C-alpha cells in the first residue's frame, strides 16, 4: 500500500506529461505552465484536508498531472528563452530547487514528527507546497513567452521574422535531439530520495530518531553536491558528467548490495551502507540533477520539441512509477539483490553515452543536426560531432532549400 500511495503521483505525472504533446504548442509555454500550476494547486488542496485514503489518492493523481506538465514545459521554456552561455546552468538551477524541496521536506517531517497531535504531523507538510503553486499561477504571466514559440509557424521569408530569427540565433543555439530520461528514471534516484528513511530503518535496522536524521542529512548533502553540477555542466560538458555520474552511481549500488547482504549485527557493514548512501547523493546530481532534462531540450527540433519532451518525460514518469511501486516489495523480498539490479541499470548510462550521445556544449547545434543527417552509421555520430568547431566564433548552418531544389544542401557562414 505504501508503494501504491507513493506511486500514484508518478502515474498522474505520466498522464500529465503525455497531455503536453496535445496542448503544449496550442497553449504556448506560459499558459501550459499556468495550467500545470493550477492542477498542482487543486491536487494539493484535495490532499491536505483528506479524511479518506480515496480522497488522498485522487489529490496525489491530480497533483501528479500538474507536476508532469511542469516537467515537460519548464525545461523547454527555459532552453528557448535562455542565452547559449547560460542555458545549462539555468536548467540545473531548477534541479537545485528540487533538491531544496527534498531536503527541506525531510527536515520539516522530522520536526513535525515530534508534535503530539498526529494530523499536524502530515497535514502541514502537505499544505506548505500550496504557497509555491500559488506563486507559479500568479507570476508566470509577468514573465516573457518563449520567442521561439511565438515565431513558430510564421512565414520564414517575412523580413521581420528573418531579422528576429537571426537575432535569436546569435543568443540561443538551436536544439536537436534525444533523451537520457528513460535511463535516468531507472538508476535508483527515487529509491534514495523517497525511501531513504525506510532503508535506514528496514535494511540497516537503525532505531529511534537516527533514521530520520540521517535521511534528512543525506538529502541536505545532496543539495550541497548539486552545486557541483551547476559548475560542471557548462565546463566539463554533458557527456563527461553523464559518464562520471552513471559510473559513480553503479559503484555505490554495488557497495550497497554487498553491505546490506551482511546480518544486521554487522556494525561495519551498516556504516559502509550508510556512507555509500551519501556517496550516491554525491554522484547522482552531478549528471542527473537536470542535465538529462537539458539534453532532451537541446536535441529536439523546434517543431517537435514539446512532443518529444512529452514522450520522453512520460517515459521518465512511467519508470519512476514502476520504481516507486516495486521498491517496498523488492526491499522486503529480495533485499540486497535489488541494489544489483539498480547497479546494472546505472552502469548502462556510460555504456550508452560513450558511443551514441554527441557533445552539445559549445557546439552549434545546427551543425549537430547536420552530423545526424550525414553520418553513414550511428557509430559515426560522436566522432563527427567531436570534430565540430567550438567557442564563441561558431558556424551557423542555414538551409538553402528555397533557393536550391537540392535537398540537404547547407550553407555555412561565420557569425561574428
Image (cartoon, rainbow, N blue to C red):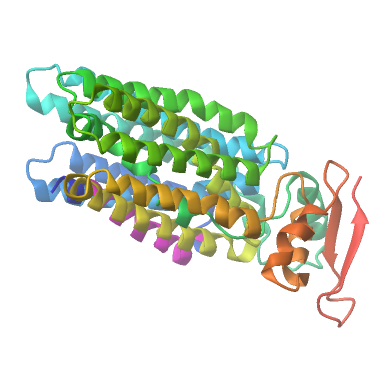
In which quadrant will I find the C terminus?
A: top right
Q: Is the residue 92 above or below the residue 292 in the image?
A: above
Instruction: Give the image location of residue 395, x and y in percent.
Output: 87, 53
Relative placement, left or right, of 12 versus 50 is right
Residue depicted at x 64% and y 33%: 232
Q: Nearer the viewer, residue 411 or 372?
A: 372
**Seen in the image, is 403 located left or right of residue 17?**
right
Image mark count: 0
Q: Residue at x 27, y 26 (%)?
A: 270
- The reply to whether residue 10 is visible in this rendering is no
Residue 169 in view? yes
Task: Name, please, the residue furthest toward the bottom.
Answer: 405
- Residue at (29%, 48%) from the top-left corner? 338
Question: Is 9 included in the stretch rendered in magenta?
Answer: yes
* Left or right of 328 in this view: 132: right
Where residue 21 sits: x, y (%)? 47, 65
Which residue is depicted at the point 53% across and 56% down?
28
Residue 193: give x, y in percent of width and height: 34, 36
Q: Nearer the viewer, residue 200 or 132?
A: 200
Magenta span covers which residues? 6-25
Looking at the image, residue 160 lies above or below residue 5:
below
User: Predominant secondary structure in magenta?
Assistant: helix
| Picture quadrant of residue 277 | top left
Counting from the top left corner in percent of width and height, residue 44 is at 25, 40
Q: Quadrant of residue 376?
A: bottom right
Describe residue 143's horizontal placement relative to residue 132 as left or right. Answer: right
**Would you identify the image quadrant in which residue 115 lies?**
top left
Quick one: 5 or 241, which is closer to the camera? 241
Residue 143 colored in magenta in the image? no
In-front residue for pair 156/231: 231
Amino acid at each position: 500500500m505504501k508503494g501504491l500511495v507513493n506511486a500514484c503521483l508518478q502515474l498522474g505525472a505520466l498522464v500529465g506529461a503525455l497531455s503536453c504533446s496535445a496542448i503544449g504548442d496550442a497553449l504556448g509555454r506560459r499558459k501550459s505552465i499556468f495550467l500545470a500550476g493550477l492542477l498542482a494547486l487543486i491536487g494539493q488542496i484535495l490532499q491536505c484536508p483528506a479524511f479518506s485514503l480515496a480522497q488522498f489518492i485522487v489529490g496525489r493523481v491530480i497533483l501528479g498531472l500538474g507536476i508532469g506538465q511542469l516537467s515537460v514545459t519548464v525545461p523547454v521554456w527555459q532552453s528557448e528563452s535562455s542565452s547559449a552561455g547560460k542555458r545549462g546552468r539555468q536548467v540545473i538551477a531548477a534541479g537545485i530547487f528540487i533538491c531544496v524541496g527534498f531536503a527541506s521536506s525531510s527536515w520539516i517531517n522530522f520536526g513535525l514528527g515530534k508534535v503530539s497531535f498526529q494530523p499536524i504531523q502530515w497535514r502541514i507538510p502537505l499544505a506548505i507546497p500550496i504557497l509555491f503553486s500559488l506563486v507559479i499561477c500568479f507570476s508566470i504571466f509577468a514573465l516573457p513567452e518563449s520567442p521561439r514559440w511565438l515565431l513558430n509557424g510564421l512565414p520564414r521569408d517575412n523580413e521581420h521574422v528573418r531579422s528576429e530569427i537571426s537575432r535569436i540565433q546569435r543568443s540561443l543555439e538551436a536544439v536537436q535531439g534525444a533523451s537520457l530520461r528513460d535511463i535516468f528514471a531507472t538508476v535508483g534516484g527515487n529509491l534514495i530520495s523517497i525511501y531513504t528513511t525506510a532503508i535506514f530503518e528496514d535494511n540497516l535496522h537503525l532505531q529511534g530518531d537516527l533514521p530520520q536524521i540521517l535521511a534528512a542529512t543525506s538529502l541536505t548533502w545532496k543539495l550541497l553536491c548539486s552545486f557541483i553540477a551547476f559548475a560542471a555542466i557548462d565546463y566539463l560538458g554533458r557527456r563527461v558528467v553523464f559518464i562520471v555520474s552513471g559510473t559513480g552511481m553503479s559503484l555505490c549500488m554495488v557497495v550497497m548490495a554487498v553491505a546490506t547482504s551482511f546480518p544486521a549485527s554487522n556494525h561495519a557493514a551498516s556504516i559502509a551502507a550508510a556512507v555509500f548512501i551519501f556517496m550516491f547523493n554525491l554522484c547522482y546530481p552531478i549528471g542527473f540533477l537536470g542535465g538529462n532534462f537539458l539534453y532532451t531540450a537541446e536535441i529536439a527540433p523546434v517543431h517537435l520539441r514539446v512532443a518529444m519532451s512529452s514522450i520522453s518525460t512520460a517515459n521518465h514518469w512511467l519508470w519512476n512509477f514502476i520504481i516507486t511501486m516495486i521498491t517496498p516489495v523488492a526491499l522486503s523480498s529480495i533485499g540486497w539483490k535489488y541494489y544489483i539490479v539498480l547497479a546494472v541499470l546505472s552502469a548502462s548510462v556510460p555504456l550508452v553515452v560513450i558511443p551514441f550521445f554527441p557533445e552539445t556544449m559549445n557546439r552549434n547545434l545546427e551543425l549537430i543536426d547536420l552530423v545526424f543527417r550525414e553520418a553513414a552509421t550511428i557509430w559515426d555520430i560522436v566522432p563527427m560531432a567531436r570534430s565540430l568547431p567550438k567557442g564563441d566564433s561558431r558556424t551557423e548552418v542555414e538551409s538553402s532549400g528555397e533557393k536550391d531544389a537540392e535537398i540537404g544542401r547547407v550553407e555555412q557562414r561565420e557569425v561574428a
